[in-house]
Image: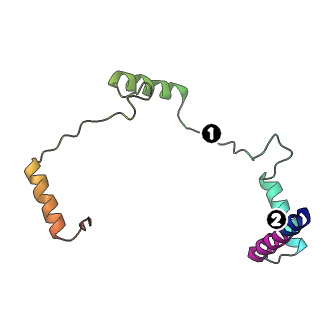
Amino acid sequence: MKIVITGLMISFSLVAGAAQAAHVDAPASIDRAQVVAELQEARTQGLLSHGELDYPAVSLQPASSKTRQEVRSELFDARAAGTLSHGELDYPIETPVNSSKTRAEVQAELAAYKAAGHIQPIPN
């Protein structure tokens, strides 16, 4: 029984390996000189990492152009305006919606929009 199971496992692994190999696209044919040129270009641009400590290559561009004082000023302004959230219960901050239309006007607009064929009815 063990021989049959072992034979089946080997057969399945060979079939799976062949199936994987059949779907792999052949790489574009480039010669050694092109690969060396691409490697040199990547080195000059600093895109190669050396070892595990500098992987992935880090971009040294500043994350923000604002000064510390500008950020602190914005924080104090947001606190004064009450637009900061505190914890998960009040996130996101809801702003009240003030509409100049009445409910009847909105319903009339919706009916006109449906009549124009912009909204398809949902089948039951």
Residue 107 location, x and y as percent?
Answer: 12, 55
Outermost front residue? 1
Give the residue pinned by disc 2: 38
Residue 1 location, x and y as percent?
Answer: 88, 64
- Residue 38 horizontal side relative to residue 104, left or right: right
Q: Quick one: 58 or 97, which is closer to the camera?
A: 97
Above-or-below relation of 73 to 118 = above
Q: Quick one: 119 or 22, which is closer to the camera?
A: 22
Task: Give the residue drawn at x 31%, y 35%.
Answer: 94
Type of residue at label 2? Glu
Above-or-below relation of 122 to 66 = below
Regarding mark 2 in the picture, which secondary structure is present there? helix
Type of residue at label 1? Pro
Residue range corresponding to the magenta coloring? 11-25
Residue 64 location, x and y as percent?
Answer: 56, 38
Give the residue pinned by disc 1: 62
Regarding mark 1 in the picture, which secondary structure is present there? loop
Above-or-below relation of 70 to 100 = above
